[in-house]
Image: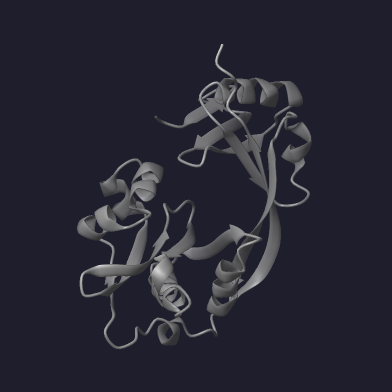
Amino acid sequence: RAGHIYTDDPARPRWGAVQELPFETVFLGGALDTATVAAIWEALQRDGEVSFGALPGNPYLALLPPGADDDALDLDFSDRDPAVDLEALARPPSGLHLARIDHDLLSRCQWGAMMIDMAGGAEQALMHGLGYCLLRGETIVSEANAGPAANGVIELGTITHPEQRGRGYATIVSARTALECERLGYDTRWNCAKDNPASAAIARRLGYRSEQEFQLLVWPKSPSE
């Protein structure tokens, strides 16, 4: 299914709400009020879960309806230190090699289906984002993805097969992905759950200097009538 866009006037909007799939995340903008947000949430919850993330002090937090059944904290990383040498961090050890994600690798990545859903198709995922895999022969041991990009900003994420963790592979593949993103002029970001210290450690290793807690709220799907 597709996401949703709500606004008061498509030609001259005073407010807007956009839901991004597959995470059900809603982004709000403009002159909204409590009643309008409640109506948007009611419509969205008929289709599935609704999530909203915000840095502390976000003015829209006061407009959100009650009933969120999950209140977690993420960490939002930005402002990467250019003095941190990504080229050095991206050197694979003997027996492994890096490859940019193409159609074949995208279909084999653990996050491939999610990236395709987020971008609206495989072609769009490759056009508006990028990523790298760390491989042993033809076997993917770790992967990092970035995108889809928006307004020059692109967010990175990484995953390593469980049996391959603890060897620094996620740092290698993330460093190469971040390096290529910056070469293309993107402002890179990193986001992870606060209770995921391994991911936060990678972000710090890559040189991200600004670190803020990010509140994540999730509302359940409305019961079927």
Q: Is residue 127 visible?
A: yes
Observer-nearest of 165 and 75: 165
Rendered position, 8 above or below 215: above
Observer-nearest of 79 and 61: 61
Residue farthest toward the front in the current orientation of the protein = 163
Rendered position, 105 above or below 7: below
Observer-nearest of 194 and 161: 161
Observer-nearest of 221 and 30: 221
Q: Residue 60 location, x and y as percent? A: 73, 38
Q: Is residue 81 visible?
A: no
Q: What's the residue at 69%, 23% (across, down)? A: 38
* Residue 59: quadrant of the picture: top right
**How is the protein colored in the picture?**
one colour
Q: What's the residue at 55%, 85% (across, down)? A: 83
The quadrant of the image that shows the C terminus is top right
Q: What's the residue at 65%, 61% (across, down)? A: 195
Q: Residue 153 location, x and y as percent? A: 50, 58
- Using residue 17 as the reference point, say whether residue 98 is left or right of it: left
* Residue 137: quadrant of the picture: bottom left
Q: Residue 138 location, x and y as percent? A: 21, 69
- Using residue 185 as the reference point, say whether residue 72 is left or right of it: right
- Using residue 23 as the reference point, say whether residue 35 is left or right of it: right
Q: What's the residue at 61%, 65% (across, down)? A: 77
Q: Residue 63 location, x and y as percent? A: 75, 32
The quadrant of the image that shows the N terminus is top left
Residue farthest toward the top in the current orientation of the protein = 225
